[in-house]
Structure formats: C-alpha cells, structure tokens
Image (cartoon, helix red, strand yellow):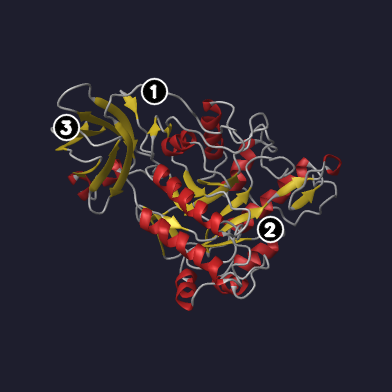
Amino acid sequence: MRAVGGVMRAVGGVMRGSGGGVGGEVWQPVWLESVPRRHVRALAWRTDPDAATVEVAVELDGRPDPGTRLSVRLALGGETVDAEAAVADPRAVLTFELPGLRNGQARDAWLWTPENPVLWDAVVELAPPRGEPDRVGSYLGIRSVGADAGRVLVNDRPAAVRAVLSQGYWPQSHLAAPDADALRAEAQLIKDLGFTSVRIHQKIEDPRFLFWTDRLGLLVWAEMPSAYEFSGTAVERLVREWAEVVRRDSSHPSIVVWVPLNESWGVDRIARLPRERELARTLYHLTKALDGTRLVVSNDGWEHTRSDLLTVHDYENDAAVLRARYGTTDALHQALAGLAPNGRRTFVGTPEETAETLRRPVVLSEFGGASIDRASDGSWGYRMVGSDEALEEHLSGLFAAVGGCAPLAGWCYTQLTDTGQEANGLTDENRVPKIPLDRLRRMIVGEDSPPAASPVFGAEPSA
C-alpha cells in the first residue's frame, strides 16, 4: 500500500516524482515509484466539525474504466467509517457523516488541537473492473480555525499564539534538511522551547516537516517566497505558484494561516500604486476561494488591504516601549494609526477593508532579533548585547513585555536559528540553544519573572 499524505501529488506526505529549486538545486524529496496503470494522483481532505462531516477529493491520473469503484475507510482507535462510490471521471468527492462530532460531550476526543493532535488514519482504494487495484494510505485532522473577540480560535476556543520565525536553512545543505530526522527534530525543538506556533519564513517547507507539525500539534503559518520586483511576469508566476502551494498543503491540519505576501516584497510601492494593491487584494481573495477554512494575511507586517489578522513587525528592543505601545487597546490603535512604528502605513485598502481589518486580532508577527555582539565575524542582529548573560536578561524582559500585552492575540519572535550573517537566533545554526533550553522555555511560556530593571547593553551582567 502506498502512503499519500493528503497533499497534492504526494506519497508519504512528500511530493512524488518532483523537486523544486533554483539553478538545478533539488530542495525537496524526489523519487520514482511503480504504480498501477490507473492510480490515485492526489488526495485533499476538508473537514467541518460543525457539520460533522469529512470530505475527500480524489484526483486520478486519468479517466477510469467503466465499473471502477472508489472506497475510503477512516479509522480512529476502534472507530471506523466507510464510504464507497462508482467513479466515472478523473476527479471524485466522497463525503463522510461523523455523528460522533454532534455529541458535545465526546467530540473533543475526535478533534485535532495543539494540545491533543488527534489524527485519523485513512485508506483509499481504487478498484478497476480488471487489473490491479491502487491502495494508498493517508491521514487527516478534524478541526476548525477562526478569529473572534481579538483572539485566534481553534475549534472555537482561543489558541495561544507564541510563535517563532524559522527560515529553514541548514549550514551543510541550505534549503534542504540534511536528512528526514532533522525535520522531526526541528519540530520537536520548537515545541520543547515552549512555542505553540512556527512561521515558516520565505520558504515553502518540506511536507515531511508538516507531517511532524501535524503529529506534534504545532500551529504553522505558511508563507510564500517573495518576488524580486513587481511585473506582469511576477504576478503571473506568483498567482500560479501560490495556488499550487495552497492546493498541495491544504490537507495539513497544522497549517492555520496562509501568508502570500510579506513586508511588501514584490509590491514595494503598494501604498502608492493601485496595481500593487490589487495584487495583494487578489491574493487574499484567491486564497479564500481555494481554501476558506483558514486565516489569510494579505501582506504580513506592513501595508494591509484586507486581512483576517492585523499583523505588525516591530523591532523595538526596549521592553518598556513595547509595553507602552501594545499594552492597552487605545495605545495599540494609536501605534498603528497613520504610520506604524516600523514607518509603514498599516492600512492602504478601501475604507471597508480598513474597517474590517481593524476588527481583526492583532499579532506582533516579528519582533526581537537580539544577538550577541561579535563584530569581528560580520554578523548582526536588530539589537546587539555584550554577552550570553546579557542576552538572557534582555530576552527575559522582551518575552515578559509582549506576554503581558493583553490586546495582542499573539507574537512571533525573530528567529529560531542563526541564518548566515543573521546571528539573531535563539539557537546557533546547528540548533544548539544559546541559553539553556529550560530557561528559554520559562521565558517563552511566561513562567519567568522579568528583570528588575532594563539591562545596560555592553555592561557587565548583574549578579
């Protein structure tokens, strides 16, 4: 039995028979596989806990012979649900009724959450009237994602958004992880540090990593790499490739936010040029049309047209200033009105778009970026400190500050690992924490007491 991980052209949760890269570099898995003459090319799962249904869209490699049947079995522990239908076209959709989801006292045992990432096993069989059947294995998680009352919701309950930015680079292999186990260890490290979420920055991540975020209950922001400049060619390629990304990865329950644009890269004149605003607007609505089950951020951190989250990037490294900017609702709205602290106009959409986005939860989706000052090696961070001890003291103040800003729905620290000259990771490039992991975790989850006073950078650490 083959294993299709619920992602487009995927076997075992990774792309089948294809790779991506620039200049011939292969950065996601590639292999050849023997399959029956008529076989399943892709699966896509969509779940609706409120309607108590699961839908699977099955794509075949071509038109099936008359009399071909498609059967699907879902299993969770001792529970099994089956569906079967004749198929005459290359695409088919089967819908399962799950009455157990209607029982409010028992439904939690069936739902995927970050705390309890329940995954259903699935087996799909395509049986022609003659010849070899095709059997594939997959999985799915049942959950909903939304936003209300200033909070991100998973299954209608507030979800803590303690996120870290990850660029997914490796010193020995660049965009490709050195091996499959490194991807598992990366997801586990993020969880062990106390983060609930990861924002994959400027990279469409290996589906084997998404397999582990599904398994471990780690929320994912999926972000499209940016175009170099705005042009007709860039628009065409961005729209096509982003649609392929959403199609490929939409079955992963851990993905909760889509980010087609970041910091106006590729739309750098969005505040002045209507065409660039139209692209941001189009990408938002295209993403909602392809997948209406997740949140979409039109242009993370900078100028927004319409977004399901209001996001801001702010590399102010004074904890007291962060508290003053985001500690109350009035202060937060004042900070984002007109020019935001990052010098960008937060709102560039129509009055209706601005009013709608203003009502959405606010996430400080990039902050921090502190680094130990090692000027001799050419590395840098958004704030340089003088020693390991000073870094710990500084981070303690920053995490306490943003954690104490009640109007924020969440935050994302920059960044997980050192990446090239950007030596502002919580770990070095080999994933070794710069501060003992247990102490980092206490800061991140909010169990650490803030320092009595702001640290003096370059001075000797306090005793």
**Is 286 situated left or right of 421 in this image?**
left
Q: Nearer the viewer, residue 432 or 26?
A: 26
Q: Which residue is mark 3?
A: 68
* Position of the C terminus by quadrant: top right
Q: Nearer the viewer, residue 225 or 82?
A: 225
| As drawn, 281 above or below 62 | below
Question: Mark 3 or mark 2, which has the lower sequence index?
Answer: 3
Q: Which residue is mark 2?
A: 315
- Mark nearest the camera among 1 and 2 is 1
Task: Compute the Cα span from label 1 to label 3.
Answer: 22 Å
Which residue lies most toward the left here? 67
Q: Nearer the viewer, residue 449 or 51?
A: 51
Q: From where the camera sits, is residue 77 visible?
A: no
Question: Mark 1 or mark 3, which has the lower sequence index?
Answer: 1
**Residue at figure coordinates x 16%, y 32% from the top left:** 68
Query: Badge 2 local density, few (<14 within 10 Å), some, or many (20+)?
Result: some
x then y, percent, for residue 148: 40, 63
Task: Compute the Cα span from label 1 to label 2.
Answer: 48 Å
* Position of the N terminus by quadrant: top left
The three-letter code of the residue at mark 1 reads: Glu
Count every numbered label the image shows and give the total.
3
Q: From where the camera sits, is residue 413 visible?
A: yes
Q: Which residue is mark 1?
A: 33
Q: Secondary structure at mark 2?
A: loop
Q: Secondary structure at mark 3?
A: loop
Query: Badge 1 local density, few (<14 within 10 Å), some, or many (20+)?
Result: few
x then y, percent, for residue 448: 62, 48
